[in-house]
Amino acid sequence: MNQRKLQVWIPLLLSLSMVIGILIGYKLHGNLPAGSPLFGGSRKDVLREAMGLIRGRYVDPVDTDTLGHAAIERVLEMLDPHSVFIPAKALDEVNEDLAGRFQGIGVEFNIFDDTVHILTVLPNGPSEKAGLQSGDRILKVGDSLVAGRGISSDGIRSLLRGPDGTKVDVTILRGIRDQRKATITRGFIPITSLDAGHMLDDSTGYIRLNRFAEDTYESFMERLEALQKQGMRALVLDLRENGGGILDEAVEIADEFLDGDKRIVYTEGAHVPRKEYTCRRNGLFEQGRLVLLMDEGSASASEVLAGALQDWDRATIIGRRSFGKGLVQEQYSLSDGSALRLTVARYYTPLGRSIQKPYADGNDKYHDEIFNRWENGRLQQPDTAVKPGTQVFLTPRGKKVYGGGGISPDIFMPFDTTESVGLLSTLYERNTLDRFAYRYYISHREEMDRFKTPQDFARGFSVDDRMFSDFERYAKTDSLDLTVLSMLEQRRLSLRIKSRLARQMWRSEGLFAVLNQEDPMILKALGKNEQ
């Protein structure tokens, strides 16, 4: 019986021990008062005594590292949904996303029929310098045969990635019989946070950001200045599906839109004093018309930027209520190479609105909240964070805004359900569109390459009846019958085929140059679909 009780208490004892170690070793925003007890001196000794008993007397061998990590994760689950433990083996990948770069060979690939196909090659990157091209198929990496072996995308990445300056040998197949070898010197490959930036019409620019990484503000400014040189007087800033990132990058961008010394955001926590972020300089775009696009995937730093612009009446926000993540995390390194990303404060908009939605009912319900919006129809009709007792705020121009659960748009746009269910959804799930676009480009490369810019392609290329029939036949290889589609569905599908071709040639810049032509939110921002 005593042994069974000990098994029950092991996770709790480990959890408390880890929490004490974290609080002692990694002081959160300032030192704890010298000599102050965390849980009382006698309790600390009891925990150490219990841990010693587990290590020295437990019936089976105990992997204390594994149990310790599990204990940390369990403790964090009891705090909030965004405090997380990052194992050492995953830390590099997590940090790469924020740093905005990784070390590799500079190709985008996909696996079709157990073969690794190179979709695009980064201009001036390591692979282009080694002579690789779109359409090449990778047969071997070093001595490892990868073709026809059921290899996964993660498996290929682990073979191709490596430290800057190291070399990797690959064997490729070009065309039908042209097999050749290449030695690639790995380098730093940018993970761009700016998906697209171009003119929508003669006076309106468009910039889409997918995250806020270390180089986001720099990339944003370069594109903003380029658009202004092209005559931009109004801007559409697209933050849809932007899950956030580095707060300072969002603050710097907000400073380009707001004048004077206006407050942008402030943070505050139980152990973190209030910190204010304000405008510090003259912005590059303080006067022109500004529209911000957001949806339920816009979170954290995206909501900070949207909240600041909305509170100061600086932008018109179009879309749907944002995710509702207003918790500030800081990352602390642990002694075994792992890290703790711990929530230390909350974000508040200039008017004092909390962005964070409730999470007291547990992490599962918290993360299911977006799905519940879908089920309850709140993605198809105007949805705000307003609940009984919700505080109402007034902007300088008297507009009502609300706290406690994301940023509600000024103009609501419903979620388009036509492509999220049924046959069109299956096309996306099975990657049929991308595979067709890749193969079409490879077999029509000369025809495609006559288009020099995404805008030329968007204006000059169309999916004709013959090409659509080719796609219908190709879809049948995935057991998909497209003859049942309505005329409207065929038109939308043709646009998606065209956008995938554009992405094949110019990556995300090409994709959005095409999709923006019929994007309902873009058209609303331009005033072209007013009822």
Image (cartoon, helix red, strand yellow):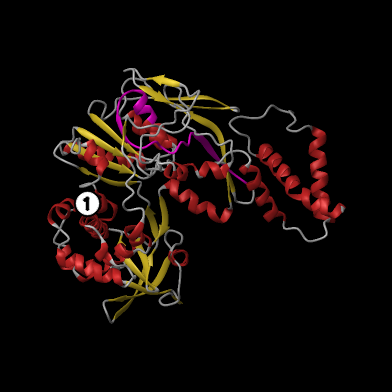
Q: Is residue 408 visible?
A: yes
> Quadrant location of residue 277?
top left
Circle 1 crowding by C-alpha within 10 Å: few under 14, some 14–19, many from 20 = many
> Quadrant location of residue 149?
bottom left
Relative vertical location of residue 501 with respect to residue 259 in this rendering, above or below: below
For the residue pair 55 and 179, the one nearer the viewer reads as 55
The percent coordinates of residue 351 (x first, y second) are: 42, 21
Is residue 46 left or right of 451 when viewed as pictured?
A: right
For the residue pair 432 and 307, the one nearer the viewer reads as 432
Relative vertical location of residue 369 with respect to residue 181 in this rendering, above or below: above
Q: Is residue 131 visible?
A: no
> Quadrant location of residue 428?
bottom left
Relative vertical location of residue 491 with respect to residue 160 in this rendering, above or below: above
The reply to whether the magenta stretch includes residue 86 is no
Residue located at (46% from left, 31% from top): 355
Residue located at (38% from left, 64% from top): 185
Q: In what element is the residue under mark 1?
A: helix
Relative vertical location of residue 112 with respect to residue 359 in this rendering, above or below: below
The percent coordinates of residue 407 (x first, y second) are: 40, 32
What are the residue bounds of the magenta stretch?
307-334
Residue located at (63% from left, 35% from top): 27
The percent coordinates of residue 294 (x first, y second) are: 35, 38
User: Which residue is the extreme one toward the bottom?
Assistant: 177
Q: What amino acid does circle 1 point to?
A: Val
Is residue 446 left or right of 181 when viewed as pictured?
A: left
Disc 1: which residue: 514
